[in-house]
Image: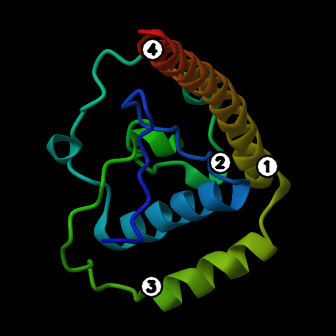
Amino acid sequence: TMWQVDKTCASGKLKPKRPYTPYNLFYLLERELVVQKINGPPKSNGIKRKHVGVAPREEDQIKPSSRYDGIVFKPYWYDPDMKEKRKHRKTHGMISFKELTGIISANWATVDKETKDYVTIISELGRKRYKDKMNLFNASQKIIQLKKEHAEADTGKK
């Protein structure tokens, strides 16, 4: 449609997605906590490991808050660039989105320091990685732009 944004640039590379905020990370964790309390942990064969060959990250070395003991995390759950596009399907039906959001926002207002520190650290690491990726992305865009200008100048001389 006419309003769609092109997320690729001249190089054809995807622009890095913005990092999650501490609240976004808390929401992801709390949603998993609620869903896994209702449905139980996901079956090990249900988790697809699409990101084979991606090195472990600093975030994986940080011990999660004790609040999330027993929760099974998806690989790279904290990285928006690694998030798979969700297939359209019916929800689990155990809790509505509105109820879930209400529970999570109430929990955020009263969250313990350990959990808030955990999501803040993960968020800071994500911001640092995003900044590095954007510097590389912007440099590649600048090189492509210079090559285009150089090619245009060459064709203009002939």
- Distance Cα–Cα, label 4 vs label 3: 53 Å
Q: Which residue does the numbered mark 1 point to in the structure image? A: 114
In depth, the one of 130 and 31 nearer the eye is 130
- Distance Cα–Cα, label 3 vs label 1: 26 Å
In depth, the one of 45 and 122 nearer the eye is 122
- Looking at the rendered structure, the kind of residue marked 3 is Phe
Disc 1 and disc 2 in contact, CB within 8 angstroms:
yes
Kindly state the secondary structure of the residue where label 4 is placed: helix
**Residue 1 visible in image:** yes
Instruction: Classify 10 Å Cα crowding around label 2: few (below 14), some (14-19), many (20 and above).
Output: few
Point 65% across, 36% down: residue? 126
Percent coordinates x, y for residue 109 in the rendering: 80, 75
- Distance Cα–Cα, label 4 vs label 1: 56 Å
Instruction: Classify 10 Å Cα crowding around label 4: few (below 14), some (14-19), many (20 and above).
Output: few
Disc 4 and disc 3 in contact, CB within 8 angstroms:
no
- Looking at the rendered structure, the kind of residue marked 1 is Glu
- The C terminus - image quarter: top left
Among numbered discs 4 and 1, the one appearing first in the sequence: 1
On screen, residue 122 above or below 38:
above
- Looking at the rendered structure, the kind of residue marked 2 is Ser
For residue 35, side relative to residue 102 (left or right): left
Among numbered discs 3 and 2, the one appearing first in the sequence: 2
- The N terminus - image quarter: bottom left
Q: Which residue does the numbered mark 3 point to in the structure image? A: 97
Kindly state the secondary structure of the residue where label 1 is placed: helix
Q: Which residue does the numbered mark 2 point to in the structure image? A: 66
Image-quadrant location for residue 132: top right
- Distance Cα–Cα, label 1 vs label 2: 8 Å
- Looking at the rendered structure, the kind of residue marked 4 is Ala
Foreground disc of the pair 3, 1: 3
